[in-house]
Amino acid sequence: MSRNSEGNKFKNIMSVGNFTKHAVENFEENIVNQRNYLEKVKENEKSRENQ
């Protein structure tokens, strides 16, 4: 593999890691700060299925 494709692979993995990290942080904040957060998420999922 070329050096450039190795660098691209690393950037892609890093991007996925950052996305996951921020998604988990956001979820944790919402669990702490919002009442009935899981119920809201469940309702949102149900409404998406019905569209």
Image (cartoon, rainbow, N blue to C red):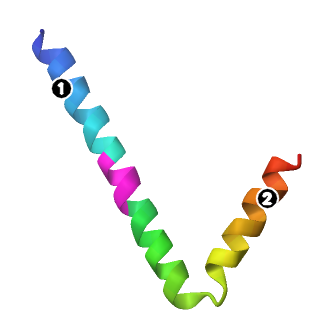
Image point 17% across, 16% down: which residue?
Answer: 4
- As helix, strand or loop, the secondary structure at mark 2 comes to helix
The part of the image, by quadrant, that contains residue 47 is: bottom right
Q: Residue at x 54, y 79 (%)?
A: 30
Residue 7 disc label: 1
Left or right: residue 46 versus residue 50 is left
Question: What amino acid does circle 1 point to?
Answer: Gly
Amino acid under disc 2: Lys
- In the displayed structure, 43 sits above or below 34; it is above
Residue nearest the observer in this picture, 8 or 38: 38
Residue at which label 2 appears:
46
* Mark 2 residue crowding within 10 angstroms, few (<14) / some (14–19) / many (20+): few
Which stretch appears magenta? 17-21
Predominant SS along the magenta part: helix
- Residue at point 12%, 9% (across, down): 1
Magenta residue check for 48: no
Whether residue 20 is in magenta: the answer is yes
Q: CA distance from mark 2 to mark 1?
A: 40 Å
Give 7 or 37, whichever is nearer the viewer. Answer: 37
> Could you tell me which secondary element the residue under label 1 belongs to?
helix
- Residue at coordinates 55% horizontally, 89% vertically from top-left? 33
| Structural crowding at the residue carrying mark 1, measured as other residues with C-alpha within 10 Å and reported as few (<14), some (14–19) or many (≥20) | few
Q: Position of residue 35 (x, y in %)?
A: 64, 90
Please give left or right for residue 30 compared with residue 40 in the image. Answer: left
Q: Is residue 36 above or below residue 19?
A: below
Instruction: Say the numbered circle drawn on residue 30.
Output: none
Whole-percent x and y of residue 13?
A: 27, 37
Q: Could you say where residue 31 lies in the image, as x and y percent from the top left?
A: 52, 82
Q: Position of residue 3 (x, y in %)?
A: 10, 16
Could you tell which of marks 2 and 1 lies nearer the N-terminus?
1
